Image: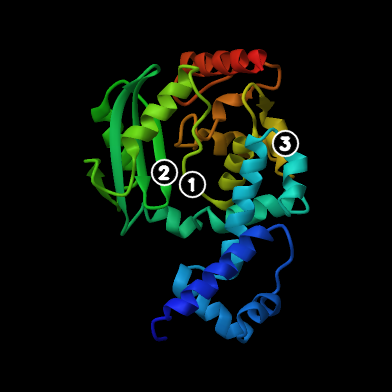
Amino acid sequence: MSEPSQQRIDQFADLARYIADHADESLPLTRLAARVHLSPSRMQRVFKSIFGITPKKFQQAARSARFRQLLRAGSDVTAAIHEAGYGSTSRLYENAAHNIGMTPKAYRAGGAGETITWACRETVLGPLLMAATDRGVCFAQFGDACDRLRQQLRDEFPGAEILAYDGRDGHELDRWIDALDAYMQNRQPRPDLPLDLRGTAFQVRVWEFLLSLQDGDVASYAEVAAGIERPGAARAAASAIGRNRIAVLVPCHRILRGDGGIGGYRWGVERKRALLDAERARKARG
C-alpha cells in the first residue's frame, strides 16, 4: 500500500477522534467506512497503515482509557464498566486479557526480541527498580539492593535486551519513580503510568481487577475470584497475585486474608502494612 496523503491522514485522524468519542457504542465497520467514503475492508487497511492497529483495537483502547478515567473520577466499578460501554464485568476482563495479556507461548519466551530499560532508586520503602518496554512499565519491585533487583529483572526476562536508563530514550523512568515515591509518602495521588502487563489471560484478569480497587479499599482472595466471575478460583487468584511483578502500580497489597488478617506480600509485610496505612489515612481525610 502506498503512503497515505496528508489529506487522507487528516481524514483518518478525524475518524480516530470519532471512534474515541463514541467508544462506548457499537461501531460496525460499515458505519466507520461511510465516514471516510471507503469500503469497510479498504478503510480498515488504511486505518491500520496510519495508526498501526485496527479500528476495533483502537476503540478497545479508548474504552479502557475511559473506564480508568471514570474510576479516577470516583465512579464505582460497576457504574464505570457500564458507562465505558463494556455492558458486563466479563466483557471488561475479556477485552483486557485479549489486548494486554501475553499468550502463554509469548510469556514463556522471556521477552525475546524486546528491549527493556531500567532504573533503580531509593524510595521511602527502600530500593525500587522500575523497568519498561515501549508499551509501559513491565517490572517494579522492591528489594534490599539494586544489584539483586537487576538480576531479578534479567531472570524474569532472560530473552530481552536489558539497558540502563540514561534519560535519552522515550521513557521517563526517573519522573515515574519520583511520582510513585511521592504517592507512597502520601504527598500525591497514585500515578497513572502506562503498564505492560505480562502474564496469562487469567493472570491479567486478576491484575485488572486489582487495578479497579480504590485507595483504602481491600478485598479477599475469594472476592477477587468472584470479581472476575470465577468464584471457585480463589487459590488460582492468589497464585496470580503472587506472580504480580509490578509493585504498588498493580496494588496487590490491597488483598487480605479471608479473616481480615494482613496476609503475605511479595515485597515484605512491613511494606504492605505501610502502604495500607497510608491509603487508609488518605481515605479518612477524604
Q: Which residue is mark 1?
A: 197
**Earlier-in-chain disc, 2 versus 3:** 3
**Earlier-in-chain disc, 1 versus 2:** 2
Q: Nearer the viewer, residue 95 or 13?
A: 13
**Which quarter of the figure is the N terminus placed in?**
bottom left
Tell me, yes or no, if residue 214 can be seen here.
Answer: yes
Amino acid at pointer 2: Cys
Real-space CA distance between mark 2 and mark 3, rounded to the nearest whole angstrom: 27 Å
**Label 1 residue SS:** loop
Q: Which residue is mark 2?
A: 138
State the residue at coordinates (57%, 63%): 58
Q: Which residue is mark 3?
A: 75
State the residue at coordinates (52%, 33%): 242
Give the label, 2 or 3, closer to the camera.
3
Q: Is residue 248 above or below residue 55?
A: above
Percent coordinates x, y for residue 102 in the rendering: 49, 55
> Contact, CB < 8 Å: mark 1 with mark 2?
yes
Amino acid at pointer 1: Leu
**Label 3 residue SS:** loop
